[in-house]
Image: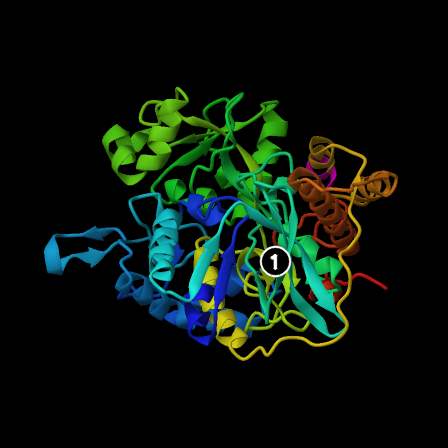
């Protein structure tokens, strides 16, 4: 949406979505959006915190662009009608800044308590919908890219209503397809997050990078038969404590920042504690703040849990880590350009290097705004790609179910990894047959994408013989200087 707004004065812009325009990870983002706007904060401190979280792999130029342009990005949203939480009444009201894990200052803005992503998405859609040059198409999944000898020339869309494939010719394509959490059995991501953009870019020869770095959010609700609903990191920022089955607060055994340690540390600590105590989950306890506070500060979380029979004001919530965010993706420069002419990417699908090996909390919505705007500006000058048009790729789906693939990646490419497990996953996927699909369905297309992404994640994780950021190898538990570089893969031939 942000890229479309920036691009609209250069021609006709089509925003096309696999589902409704609302269905995305942004819609469910509870935590907030970070920016150095508070009186005691500085851009340099936000930059330092981001680089520290990235564990040696951040692109420093990308980080600087992110934090430097953050205040203006927030002001744009406010000017377009975004309603962030404030204290006080009327003109004297001030923005409320919260602190989340690994931030050195209170710099995280929220909207309606825990509906920040929803408010930002609403604001951007309202702004984009007011611009005549932008049009929208929903329930029409982009399933592949059209390309010629010299680059990308458009996209192939699958219309849900008719089941027909349609070619869309364009001067430029921006991938803004979000994450790949549904490659895993346990994920906080919505069902649409099947890694489509990375897989499509990979198939046309674009460079993909750092796919081994998958962030597992430590606190997904773990109720039998219920979806893995995210319990925001902001809850720990407001005093929630992780406890084991004996009621003990255990994080002080694992990190000096205790419950506000970086997400990868907390996720591994939870896994270790579950193993130590023989429990299928741990508990997140915010009862000390009382029902009134929780209801007012986290209304969406409180009501959702209450609907599932869990009163957060009176009882702790069972939680378990789940795949949440991909730091890697389609390799881009700071303007969203990929290694393939005419193809751009922004947001979670992209790897600009801004997150390095581990994303700092509440930088993801900000990344979408800053790099969406940058990509939109760069696309204005794209003249279109010439050359011979290649035919559509052949359609074939792996001879396996999505649930089997997700179980495989969760077991061998999850929070804890080792050579034997990763090689076992690679071998298992290599042995899966393929089924030719004459008229592909959306499910078959998503299955192919999950299959390709699972292989790329496993191969990337096998290559990185160290532990860094969100990537943890039990057989290589320390960082190694020779791996202080990005992983990079490109389809051969």
Q: Quadrant of the N terminus?
A: bottom left
How many other residues sit within 10 Å of disc 1, few (<14), some (14-19) or many (≥20)?
many
Please, what is the dominant secondary structure of the magenta stretch?
A: helix
Label 1 SS: loop
Based on the picture, tell me whether residue 412 belongs to the magenta stretch.
yes
Left or right: residue 146 compared with residue 188:
right
What residue sits 86% from the left and 38% below the top?
Answer: 433
Q: Nearer the viewer, residue 133 or 236?
A: 133
What residue sits 59% from the left and 61% below the top?
Answer: 350
Image position of 388 with respect to 245: above or below: below
Image position of 292 with respect to 329: above or below: above
Residue 256 appears in the picture as rendered: no
Residue 419, image quadrant: top right
What residue sits 47% from the left and 73% below the top?
Answer: 11
Q: Nearer the viewer, residue 59 or 174?
A: 174
Q: Nearer the viewer, residue 232 or 102?
A: 232
Q: Position of residue 237 (x, y in %)?
A: 37, 45
Magenta-drawn segment? 409-413
Q: Which residue is mark 1?
A: 357
Q: Position of residue 210 (x, y in %)?
A: 67, 59
Q: Position of residue 292 (x, y in %)?
A: 23, 31
Q: Position of residue 79 (x, y in %)?
A: 27, 65
Q: Count numbered badges in the picture.
A: 1
Residue 2, image quadrant: bottom left
Left or right: residue 122 compared with residue 457:
left
Q: Quadrant of the C terminus?
A: bottom right
Left or right: residue 92 compared with residue 412:
left
Based on the picture, tell me whether residue 25 belongs to the magenta stretch.
no
Please, which colouring scheme is shown? rainbow
């Amino acid at each position: 949406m942000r890229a479309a707004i920036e691009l609209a004065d250069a021609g006709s812009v089509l925003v096309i979505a696999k589902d409704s325009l609302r269905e995305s990870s942004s819609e469910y983002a509870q935590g907030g959006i970070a920016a150095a706007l508070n009186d005691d904060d500085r851009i340099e401190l936000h930059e330092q915190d981001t680089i520290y979280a990235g564990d040696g792999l951040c692109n420093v130029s990308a980080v600087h662009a992110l934090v430097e342009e953050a205040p203006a990005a927030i002001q744009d949203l406010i000017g377009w009608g975004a309603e962030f939480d404030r204290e006080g009444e009327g003109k004297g009201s001030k923005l409320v800044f919260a602190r989340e894990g690994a931030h050195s200052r209170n710099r995280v803005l929220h909207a309606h308590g825990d509906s920040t992503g929803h408010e930002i998405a609403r604001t951007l859609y309202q702004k984009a919908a007011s611009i005549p040059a932008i049009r929208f198409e929903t329930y029409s999944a982009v399933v592949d890219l059209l390309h010629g000898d010299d680059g990308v020339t458009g996209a192939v869309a699958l219309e849900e209503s008719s089941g027909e494939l349609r070619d869309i010719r364009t001067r430029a394509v921006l991938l803004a397809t979000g994450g790949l959490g549904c490659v895993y059995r346990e994920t906080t991501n919505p069902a649409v997050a099947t890694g489509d953009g990375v897989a499509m870019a990979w198939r046309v020869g674009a460079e993909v990078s750092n796919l081994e770095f998958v962030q597992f959010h430590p606190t997904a609700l773990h109720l039998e038969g219920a979806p893995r609903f995210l319990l925001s990191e902001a809850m720990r920022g407001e005093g929630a404590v992780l406890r084991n089955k004996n009621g003990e607060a255990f994080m002080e055994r694992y990190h000096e920042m205790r419950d506000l340690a970086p997400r990868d540390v907390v996720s591994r600590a939870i896994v270790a504690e579950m193993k130590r105590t023989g429990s299928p989950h741990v508990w997140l306890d915010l009862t000390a703040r009382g029902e009134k506070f929780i209801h007012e500060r986290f209304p969406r979380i409180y009501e959702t849990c209450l609907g599932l029979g869990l009163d957060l004001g009176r009882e702790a919530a069972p939680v378990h880590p789940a795949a949440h965010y991909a730091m890697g993706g389609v390799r881009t420069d700071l303007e969203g350009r990929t290694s393939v002419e005419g193809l751009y990417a922004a947001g979670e699908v992209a790897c600009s290097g801004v997150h390095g090996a581990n994303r700092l909390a509440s930088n993801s919505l900000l990344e979408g705004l800053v790099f969406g705007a940058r990509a939109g500006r760069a696309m204005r000058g794209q003249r279109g790609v010439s050359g011979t048009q290649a035919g559509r790729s052949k359609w074939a789906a792996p001879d396996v179910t999505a649930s089997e693939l997700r179980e495989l990646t969760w077991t061998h490419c999850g929070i804890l990894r080792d050579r034997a497990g990763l090689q076992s996953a690679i071998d298992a996927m290599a042995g899966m047959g393929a089924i030719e699909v004459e008229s592909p369905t959306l499910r078959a297309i998503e299955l192919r994408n999950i299959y390709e992404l699972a292989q790329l994640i496993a191969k990337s994780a096998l290559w990185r013989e160290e532990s860094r950021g969100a990537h943890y190898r039990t057989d290589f538990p320390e960082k190694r200087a020779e791996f202080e570089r990005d992983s990079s893969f490109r389809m051969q031939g």
